[in-house]
Image (tube, grey):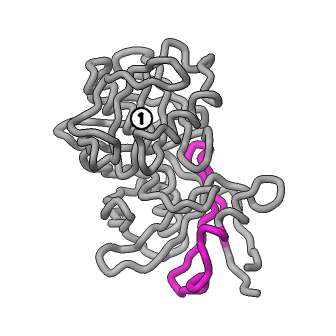
Amino acid sequence: MAEIRFWKMHGLGNDYVVIDNRDGKLDGKDPGEIAKKLCRRRFSIGADGLLLLCDSSVADVKMRIFNADGSEAEMCGNGIRCLAKYCFENNVTRKTELRIETLAGIKTVWLNIEDGTVRSVTVDMESPILERPKIPMAGDGRCIDEELEVEGERFNVTCLSVGNPHCVIFVDDVDDFPVEKFGPKFENHPVFPNRTNVEFVEIMRNNEIKIRVWERGVGETFACGTGACAAVVAANLTGKISNECIVHLLGGDLHIEYGNDRILMRGAAEKSFEGILEI
């Protein structure tokens, strides 16, 4: 068996096992199966997902993301902040501006350093994707404030991609909304060929929203960076908020700016502990 060093990290409670695989020690193994084993709570380390740090020929580093069910994700806003902190604090690079390759393209991040520690990370999430085929979602054109039937009920939804697919639903009271009932129904709705992440959003004021997130392949999580970005874009497109917004998630707050067709996300990333496992 190979001994593998790991960090357990989280972004606002959205937690990950982070492994440096630049030496290829996991090559030839199924990373999805490894993710399923390591992410089992109570029986293993426990996490929402596995992050693999890999070499990149086009950026400073490459990030691969595997959900708790073993599926590979295109992009993760909380995960990329964790990976950036891991890289700096493990001397993979001492840059404070990094380009990180993902399945959703190369993302630029900026690190806020205090006393040699990464305190927060700002991520350029680039432009949202609104055309249905590119989300992907069945049909043509855009889906902004359109009706979708789920479990015999009709909801107004706004759908987009922020590197991964999202379906945003505005509700009056997000705390009392039955996320566990409707989350999986939206995630697996036939209109989404690759399934979707789901955000249930309550508008608090012009620059403040509260959301709960049902993540594709994971379930409800404490936070989702791409979900927070998707919620702000959807709320902006439907005229509910301004361009700059504080997003309250179960695990904490993110600061999102959306202007000139560009999304910037700022938030914390934390190390919980480190250890050694055998694979």
Asked if one can make out residue 134 in the rendered structure from this viewpoint, the answer is: yes
Residue projecting furthest to the left? 260
Relative to 200, is 51 above or below?
Answer: below
* Residue at (51, 47) in percent of width and height: 268
Which of the image's four quarters has the C terminus? Answer: bottom right
Q: Over which residues does the magenta segment extend?
A: 6-34
Using a 10 Å C-alpha cutoff, classify the residue at mark 1 as few (fewer than 14 neighbours), some (14 to 19) or many (20 or more).
many
Asked if one can make out residue 266 in the rendered structure from this viewpoint, the answer is: no
Where is residue 135? Give x, y as percent.
Answer: 32, 46
Taking the image as shown, residue 257 lies to the left or right of residue 30, namely: left
Residue 154 location, quadrant: top left
What type is the residue that disc 1 sits on?
Cys
Where is residue 275? Give x, y as percent.
Answer: 74, 70
Reading the image, the residue beneath label 1 is 167
Relative to 44, is 235 above or below?
Answer: above
Instruction: State the SS at label 1.
Output: strand
Query: For this rendering, which residue is in front, 174 or 267?
Result: 174
* Residue at (28, 42) in percent of width and height: 132
Where is residue 267? Give x, y as percent.
Answer: 46, 44
Relative to 89, is 130 above or below?
Answer: above
Residue projecting furthest to the top? 172
Residue 181 location, quadrant: top right
Whether 33 is among the magenta residues is yes
* Residue at (53, 46) in percent of width and height: 216
Which of the image's four quarters has the N terminus? Answer: bottom right
Query: For this rendering, which residue is in front, 129 or 116?
Result: 129
Query: For this rendering, which residue is in front, 44 or 109?
Result: 44
